Amino acid sequence: MSDAQPERYLVMGATGAQGGAVLRRLTALGRTAVGISRGAASGAAGSSVASRAVDLADRAGLCRAFEGVTRVAASLPLVYEAEVAAGYAANLVHAARETGVRRLVFNTNLPVPPAPTGYPAFETRRLAEEALMASGLPVTVLRPPLYLDNLFGPGHAPALVNDGVLAFPLPESLPVSWMSLEDMAAATVAALEGADELVGGALRVGGAEAVTGPRLAAVFEEVLGREVRFHSMDPHDFEAAVSAVLGPELGAGIAGGYHWARAAADDSSFTADPDSVEKHLGIRLTPLRQWIAAQPWNQWAHSGS
């Protein structure tokens, strides 16, 4: 690939909230970017950029999508079968190698504990990360904790706004460096464009502060000016609720991380050093209070829980 080739970015999962945030940031910076998603082609989430439908199981189709692309923001969809994840990772490696991608940033979308957990939520991402890191490609891995934006969704926000209950399937005492999708997008773009020292490494990223569930509820209470208490959901109840909407296979896969958090997580499992994140990526993380204050919580008022 010639050094004179113009930079062109590709964002995977572009019709979802996470990929859409990356695509919005790239277009706001004036970068030439395209999006792909596993479903039907449509506008990327919150962006005017169209997204092409590409199945990660289709190696030839993925290679076509990568043609002319120099930098890739990669992630896996909600898959929890080891064989499927391995196939996706192998196709990513092949497409990036064949098309001469200059930088690939892989978002694991959740922490990757140092030791095997037995839960596919973590192990499929570990498998993909290891395949990418062993490929010899210019890969950077970002490992976020949990996203603040999940709390603004229909599964949590109505109860928070209407009942003053912040319910989440984590132990009360577990600290979490909750991160916004916009900050994760900033981290992703910074890694795509950052110094070569970021290549070949896995960086734990997170928000500006780590808080326990009760402390998070207290910050919500301070900002919203109403009583908010934290409720530590039983992961089994959470799994049942997700399974009712997405089916038992996805329900078990998504809930697996929370079962592990309840049984085996320590105080560092879902945290990251904000100073290190800002230093390595050259970004400023959004303070928790600032993010809460910026959301239109009233849209959930009286909508039920």
Image: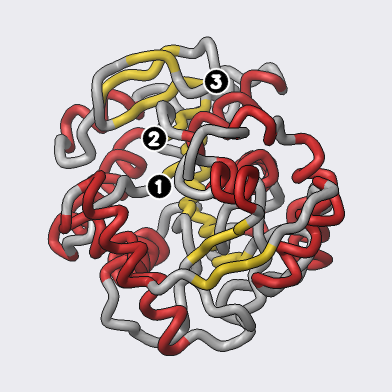
Q: Is residue 300 left or right of residue 255?
A: right
The span from disc 1 to disc 2 (Cα, nearest Å) is 7 Å
The span from disc 3 to disc 2 (Cα, nearest Å) is 13 Å
Q: Is residue 1 visible?
A: no
Q: Which residue is mark 3?
A: 46
Q: Amino acid at mark 2?
A: Gly
Secondary structure at numbered mark 2: loop
Residue 249 placement: quadrant: bottom left
Who comes first in sequence, dot 3 or dot 1?
3
The mark lying in front, picked from 3 and 1, is: 3
The span from disc 3 to disc 1 (Cα, nearest Å) is 18 Å
Q: Amino acid at mark 3?
A: Gly
The x and y percentages for residue 169 are 47, 68
The x and y percentages for residue 183 are 69, 45
State whether residue 234 is above or below residue 156: below
Who comes first in sequence, dot 3 or dot 2?
2
Q: Which residue is mark 2?
A: 13
Within 10 Å of the Cα at label 3, are there few (<14), some (14-19), or many (20+) other Cα atoms?
some
Residue at 48% in and 52% down? 107
State whether residue 267 is above or below residue 111: below
Residue at 65% in and 59% down? 178
Q: Which residue is mark 1?
A: 75
The x and y percentages for residue 199 are 58, 58
Q: Amino acid at mark 1?
A: Ser
Q: Is residue 120 left or right of residue 74?
A: left
Residue at 24% in and 64% down? 252
Q: Is residue 229 left or right of residue 53?
A: right
Secondary structure at numbered mark 1: loop
